Image (spheres, coloured by chain):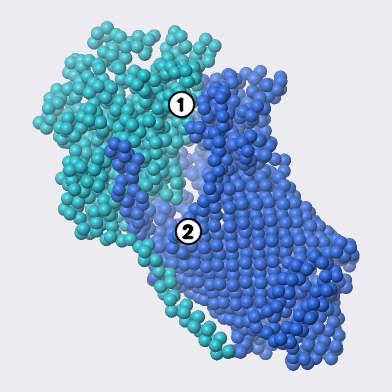
Amino acid sequence: MHLIDQLIYFKSNLKMKKTIKKRNPSLRLAFIIVLVLSGFTNFNVLAQEKLSGTVTDKDGNLLPGVSILQKGTRNGTSSDFDGNYKITLKTGEKTLVFSYLGFKTLEIPVKGRKVINVSLSESSETLDEIVVIGYGTQKKASVVGAISQIKGAELQEANLGVTNVQEALQGALPGVVAIQGSGVPGRNDMQLFVRGQSSWNGNGQPLILVDGVPRDIDNIDFNDIENISVLKDASATAVYGVQGADGVVLLTTKRGKTGKAQLSLTANTTMRTVSRLPGKLDAFDAITQSNRAVLRELAYDEALWNNYRPQEIVNLHRFPRNEQDALVYPNVNWEDAITKDYAVDYRINLSVRGGGDNSKYFGSLAYQKVSDIFDGARYDNGKGYESEFAYDRFNFRSNLDFNITETTQFSVNLGGFLGIQKSPGNLNLITNSIYELAPNIYSPVFPDGYFGRDQTDIFANSNPIVQLTNTGFTTTRTFNITTDFILRQNLDFITKGLSFKGAFSFDNQSVSNQSLRDPGGDGQENVRYRIFDEFFNEIIESPNGTNDFAYVPTPWTYGSADIPNSRIRRNITYDLSLNYSRTFDEKHDVSVLALFRRQQRATGSQFPVLREDWVGRVQYSFDDRYLLDVSGAYNGSEKYGPDFRFDLFPAVGAGWIVSNEDFMSDVKWLNKLKFRGSYGQIGSDNGGARFAYQQLWGTSPGAYIQSGQGQSRQRSPYQFFQQLSIGNPNLQWETSEKYDFAVEMGVLNNKITGEFSYFRENRSNILIPGSQRAVPDLIGATPPPFNRGKTEVRGYEIVIGVNHTFDNGLNLNARFNFNQAINKVIDREDPALAPDYLKAAGFPIQQPRSGIPDAILTNWDDIYSSTPRVNGQEFTRAGYYNVNDYDGDGVYNGNFDNVPYGYGNQPQRFWTANLGARYKAWSISAQLYGSQNASRTYTSRTFSNQSDTFFVHELDYWTKDNPTATRTLPGYGVGQGTTDPRRSLFDASVVRLRSVALSYQVPKSACKKLGVSSLKLFANGNNLFLWTDLPDDREFNSSLTADSRFRGDYPTLVTYNFGFNLNF
Amino acid sequence: MKFFKIKIFFVFGLLFLSSCEEYLDIAPQAVLTEEEVFSSFDGTQGFVEEMYALMVNPGTQNHTFSEHLLGDEIFENASFKFSARVDRGELDNWINNTLSFLGRGTRFGSNRPFGDTSNNNGRAQPKVWLGSLSGIRKANIVIKNEDLMVGLSQEEKNVALGQAYFFRAYFHNQIMKYWGRFPYINEVLEGVIEIPRPATYKEVALLADEDYKKAIQLLPDNWDNEPYGQLTIGNNANRLTKSIAYAYKGKNLLLAASPLMFFNNAPGIDPYTYDKELAAMAVDDFAEVLKLDGSTYSFAQNMEDYTKVLWNTPQNTMPGLVPEAREFIFTANGASNPFQSNSFMSHGIPRDIAGGGTQCASVTHSFINNNFGMANGLSIEDDLSGVYGPPTYNPLRPFDNRDPRYYEWIFSDRDVIGTRASIPAVHRSLAMYFTDNAGNPGQHRRQNNSKTGYLYKKFYPKNDNGEYHTNVGNRILGQYRGMLLSMRLTDVYLMYAEALHVSRGATSAPNSFNLTAEQVINKIRTRAGIPNINPAIVADSKKFMDELRRERAVELSFESHRWLDIRRWGVAHLPKYKRKTELRYDKDWTFFEEVLLTERVCEYPKHYWLPFQVNQTQFYEGFPQNPGW
């Protein structure tokens, strides 16, 4: 660096330093960072024409960090902390361009002036002007692909209490369906679909990229998100070739901005309460129901009389005579017993953002604590440990950009998190208390520390408090680091507009497990139980045995932390690209990209999974009226044999901005009219195992066939050799053809905007995994996978926005979107002889099937004339449905008479309504979300194991006295199986008040007194109201627990947040 | 400077370009080939060896509790259990019931339907349907690859192929046991499969018979005497030999000769009509095994030694291998987890007594009364008839004067578990009465205890003082290992007697062996300590068959043979076998009353065979479903 330059620079910095010190000493640290970082800078001072001025907003507030550029050159500067700028003009056009995030860009011809003071006006439109696309960005106006995006700030505002980014995406973007299964702290249980699902492989989840590299987004702190962009059609995703068929989600993290250091502190507290859970009858009412059922069923099984409870006993459950009674004849509300009224979470984020001419930085630290809605803390186990679900996360990120030379920029991104998750016992046995345990089964805990248990110790009736607090816990620590090194080189010296970018990313994640084990002797729970048998005699059981009073708990042990090999991940991605972007004759905008990329993803000690991509794209726009976009990827996937490894996925998109035509210049009411359309082919290699293209042989440890004395538990000395897979050398990816047609409009000064898109997708060559092949089991192995399936998706999206600011400054805005995507299987290798209505072809991918209930059997005449059943003839009873013999063979057989009914988990339609208002410092917004055409299976445990469990939503059942009811009689002692073939299939449509957010911007004057530059207070709530026929608030049955379908899952929650955002 | 940058750029570019073709190739060290596997004995035997682990031991194959009795022996009412579903006639439940040893999936679910043969947990191992089909494929791969076995001696080749031929037949037999006639697969199937289902059971059985013949030629007498057996010397008892192949060859033929297979689903099945020709062939095969009684095998001579076959061996040892009672012939190992062995041994005992993880299967009164007879050797029915002497059965003292095996294997009310002070008083003796004066049932007649008034203890250990295992007070369960179910010498004797009686009558011996069917039955009765079979019964062919079958029911009770037996005899649909009853009595034994617990849903032929999963019958014409489904 030039000595003189450095001196000048240093001096100016010194001056700045003093000002800062005076105003806000706390900024020293940030300033030092700036100083250090900007030390690399290189100044070119070619004195010509000097200019200065001040930049303010409409209200006269000084704006620091505004970028000021001499038009058509790279000569520029930015405003300082007091909004002042100085610039020396070079040769070229004498016009200054003022641009600042969130404000309208302003161009001002210099016209010989020495001082130019400008006032920038805010614009919500400009925010949207740049769209993040695959491997780059683009002006929104020139986009021809189907892309929706949302700013991180906007997402954060509505979702502050939400801990997971995927969860926040529900309803946030048109065309993106997000459904939630459970709410375990620190675990992601979302399913995300972009424009519906068109394959049965890989769950239809989109490709998710963070800063251009495949990474998880679950654990990113909201404050680090600059933007989330979703690419939906072929034109947008073609550059991702074989990975793009299910859509692409691009998350961009914040980067430094030129300007003074902005130190920002966000803190919020979240209160969370349980959303909807199925309601159960209390002991008195439930036993009454049981007794009624017993009376009904005595005709089938007289032994049931033993289960009839005399009224005196039933009364005791509701009106205990004393405290002892209350324990012996309990009436437990398990939801209250196991959950807290509310859980309190915290999140704090400290970030700094700024930069000089030569370096920019963004740094952020965040800590988040998610606590348990289950109430383990209420029950002290007296063993010196507390076990609850919990998640603590510490996030860090630093994104740095350095201008090494005038034409070379080097960026380093470092991000990651440490997540500490604590999870006790068996989650299913804890949630089971709400979904299965009867209110009178036992008292959970006795005052003397004994726990309740049922006499027979049925697994399903395990004491949830014991499971939660007395069976130890596992601490899972996830440590994740992601790094990017990016070099950008301007290659104007070769030809103008050419640049080179090379990026190298290295990610590492390891997960360790550490368990506190607390088993009693004999593998039973390490607690004492007080049991009351059916005659209410007391029995004490401890791990030492029955009625053994000398019980001493077995000491618990804390295992060492171990990192399973399968949970270490190392990913390496590197790419090299050439970009060319230039405007000719002011009318021809050309932009070209050529890129080469390789990815290595390794888990544990396995061979890394490899990918190789070659990407090209040409974008051309003529006079902002005609747009053309041709792109493609030449991709390789190691999943396929050499002949099928690489292929080209091309796409073309075109647009016409009618409103920019001369003949439209007179049409004042129409501000925007744009037609765009695209067509392309995209691939997916989501399905199938690695190397399935070749026959694989392998080994496994061996068998226990040893027989001799003292040896029987040893393995035989021969290691097993196996044919692992048969292999299909013709294996290849799925190919998806996508069409997208859209109209965008803006009328009345863009006060009303609208967008309508119609899309279709035809997917072919869908991989049919071996396990789903229509090959007889006779083959004796998993058949080789092959490509055959065909599906189609048809759908549309409508987005309508209204935005009006009244003269008094009140702004009202509303955005409504409606989406539909319906998939249909065209071919899925159905067994040739299966009847059409049982084939997958012709129905949606997740189509459920059920028997057809005809009418409730009400008397013996009905029963005698009812359909005979191939199985379960005992289900032909009064109060049960008669089932339809659909195939007319004279008997009901579930294999042939169950027909398509209902929908999959994933809603075919959803809509979102956002309403907002801003007035001066106040802002309020609300979002409603609704989904339709979805089903969920929930199998109620009413009367399971002849216990007194009865759910409120099942009360209205058929009896002689209630002949119009549609629910069947609940079975108590007799089989409960197929009383109604559809009783477990629920309409999963929901409407929720997804969020309400209120914020208040403390006035500048007050902020000044506090010594801060801005302060914003906010309160919001998520998932506040739910309207649905579902008995609980889960949109699908999670796979995180084994029995989610009937034992429930970690409850989903309603959250209330309070917090502030402080900028220094 | 300018050129330098360009250079760097192009050098980098070329570097990546040049290597792109190979970049996505599979790493060479990940590839193992078929040729390598079969080029050595280690590889070939390693490939063959897995077939031993593809066999299913029903006793230990289940979940945390054992569940292997599907016939009329026990009563289960928990509807999630396959045995309860069988009682309800819902045989197609085998497909989805992962708790059953037949189930199509394993506990790994649909991800790994074939299970894990290396897992030491029986429940994680393959189950009958897919395990057997996978075994057939393995056997065919071995047979196909004879030419690749370049590094093997002739003896090594022989034993590898001998095992493969045996297993090909064995696994077909496993499927035929439950699903009936089945295509005989003798090639490695790939791609398109359209093999029709054969018309009769017999034609498949004869194809299997050919494979057993080849196996007999190729297998050794004893691995311990062969060079390739030295690696596993002392541990070779469960490795295939000629005599094992003879035993299974005979069983295959006897099954094919049995009434169910003989009538081939035709109406009017007669439980006494066999295919005599096939039965005669079976006799000679069984004879080859029985000739070895006294050398390779030894028949337990008394009830004391008999316990060594059933459970009385140290935990690390296989039962049935001691010289004085070497009844062990062949078994699926059922992995090695002692927990599952324990839950098998305590299958008939309530959890309160036996300890955690078990569930109590109650022996039905109907099974006991129809089969466990009196000390005089007569069935209760014959005893009460008065034809063979004054009755000894007292309906008011039904537990008296019974066959010694009743006392050895069945618990009745008031039986003593143990007397130690550490055993909770309530569990020292059994209280299985239905009601006391106040109307309450005994401690061991309550929920999750005996539902019938009896319990079974055939594999349940007791110590030298005659005290049984209890969870508290006398923990000895873990010191022993229960028998592994499959085939033992008594079974071969009984099958021999059955085949012989069918083909030559009760009192004549074949050329191949010197015992008559009557002598075999008496040999077994002598061990049990009851008199010989009454000559009047021997003289009546059908009556003798009934006694032979009763003897088989008692001797092989709770060993997973019963369901197959009552099906192959064509009797499962008769009221005597359909009705499961309990015995109700009061605490003071003032009344005894037989009460129906459930009537099994069983029609001939619908409930005699498991249905195939529906799609298996929809892939091509020519693979029809079993009747009634």
Q: Which chain is cyan?
A: B
Q: Nearer the viewer, residue A922 or B189?
A: A922
Residue sitting at 30 percent across and 55 percent down? B189
Q: Nearer the viewer, residue B323 or A792?
A: B323
Q: Chain of mark 1?
A: B
- Badge 1 marks a residue whose secondary structure is loop
- Percent x, y of residue B221: 17, 41
For residue A389, above or below residue A740? above
Q: Is residue A34 visible?
A: yes
Q: Which chain is blue?
A: A
Query: Label 1 amino acid?
Result: Asn
- Percent x, y of residue A310: 62, 18
For residue A811, above or below residue B6? above
Disc 1 packing (10 Å; few <14; some 14–19; many ≥20): many
Q: Quadrant of residue A413?
A: bottom right
Gap in angstroms between the C-alphas marked 2 and 1:
43 Å
Query: Label 2 amino acid?
Result: Gly
- Residue farthest to the left, as pictured: B511
Asked if both marks, 2 and 1, belong to the same chain, the answer given is no
Q: Give the residue at mark 1.
A: B471
Q: Quadrant of residue A120?
A: bottom right
- Badge 2 marks a residue whose secondary structure is loop
For residue A907, above or below residue A866? below
Q: Which corner quadrant holds the N terminus of chain B? A: bottom right
Q: On residue A786, which mark appears?
A: none
Residue sitting at 76 percent across and 80 percent down? A10
- Percent x, y of residue A174: 66, 62
For residue A1030, above or below residue A810? above
Q: Give the residue at mark 2.
A: A604
Residue sitting at 38 percent across and 30 percent down? B479
- Percent x, y of residue A356: 73, 77
